[in-house]
Image: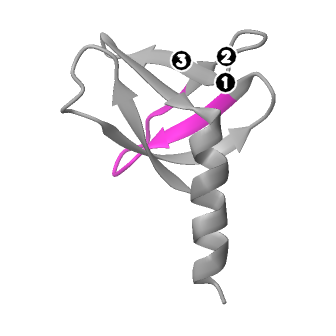
Amino acid sequence: MRVSLSDIEREEEPMEVEILEVNRSTMRVLVSNTNVIFSLHKQDGSSVFKGGIGGRSFEIDARSLAKNKKRDDSNLT
């Protein structure tokens, strides 16, 4: 599933990534059009995954993943 990560310091510059794996505390993503893989993590009780790469910090709310998944599933029918 492809999603946009919000840049914490530059809201107008999101990063498109492909989710490779996600579990309760970690999300591994592939940066679109590259071979770069990195991980985002969330703390206990938080719904937000956070991580950084190349001096930039990104986040995504796990609740938005459920919304995207439902939308992707509806496109299959």
Residue placed under numbered mark 2 in the picture: 42
Which amino acid type corresponds to the residue marked 1 in the rendered image? Answer: Ser
| Rendered location of residue 76, percent (x, y) | 64, 84
The colour scheme used here is one colour
Q: Are marks 3 and 2 in contact (CB under 8 Å)?
A: yes
Q: CA distance from mark 3 to mark 2?
A: 6 Å
| Rendered location of residue 69, percent (x, y) | 64, 59
Magenta highlight range = 27-38
| Magenta stretch contains residue 74 | no
In the image, which disc is placed on residue 47?
1
| Magenta stretch contains residue 36 | yes
Residue displayed at 47% across by 49% down: 3
Secondary structure state at the residue bearing disc 2: loop
Identify whether 64 is placed above or below 53.
below
Which amino acid type corresponds to the residue marked 2 in the rendered image? Answer: Lys
In the image, which disc is placed on residue 65?
none
Q: In the drawing, does residue 18 fall left or right of residue 6?
A: right
Dividing the picture into quarters, in which one does residue 43 lie?
Answer: top right
User: Is the C terminus in the top left, top right, bottom left or bottom right quadrant?
Assistant: bottom right
Label 2 neighbour load within 10 Å: few <14, some 14-19, many 20+ = some
